[in-house]
Image: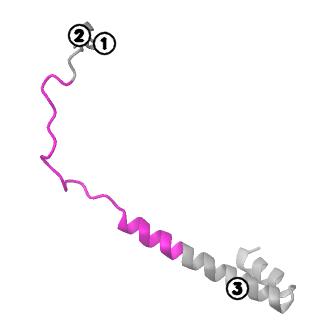
Amino acid sequence: MNTLVRIAEQTQKLPEPLQQEVLDFIEFLQHKHALSTTQANARKRQAGLHAGLVSVADDFDAPLDDAFWLGQS
């Protein structure tokens, strides 16, 4: 059975004030979903905004000597 049909059937069995609560909750969920979608779109990262800002040393992958690990550097 379709979810919407089941919701409608169950909601019709409720007293009017509770039906209004169901409607209020649905509207709340719609608003919450719209906000989360808008925020997710606003937060999307864009590659290349800070290109060239950071450089990696040529010896980045070189092993560190014992003095570094012993706190003597």
For residue 65, the mark is 2
Residue under numbered circle 3: 23
Main SS, magenta residues = loop
Q: Residue at x 68, y 84 (%)?
A: 24
Q: What's the CA distance linking mark 2 and mark 3?
A: 67 Å
Is 31 on the left or on the right of 25, as rendered? Answer: left
Measured as percent of width and height from the top left, residue 68 is found at 26, 14
Q: Quadrant of the N terminus?
A: bottom right
Q: Residue at x 75, y 88 (%)?
A: 20
Give SS at disc 2.
loop
Check contact, mark 2 vs mark 1: CB within 8 A: yes
User: Is 44 colored magenta in this rendering?
Assistant: yes
Q: How many marks?
A: 3
Q: What's the CA distance linking mark 2 and mark 1?
A: 7 Å
Q: Give 11 or 9, whichever is nearer the viewer.
A: 11
Q: Which amino acid does the dot numbered 1 rest on?
A: Trp
Give SS at disc 3.
helix
Q: Which amino acid does the dot numbered 3 rest on?
A: Leu
Measured as percent of width and height from the top left, residue 44 is found at 35, 61
Q: Is residue 13 above or below residue 52?
A: below
Check contact, mark 1 vs mark 3: CB within 8 A: no
Give SS at disc 1.
helix
User: Is 40 colored magenta in this rendering?
Assistant: yes
Q: Which amino acid does the dot numbered 2 rest on?
A: Asp
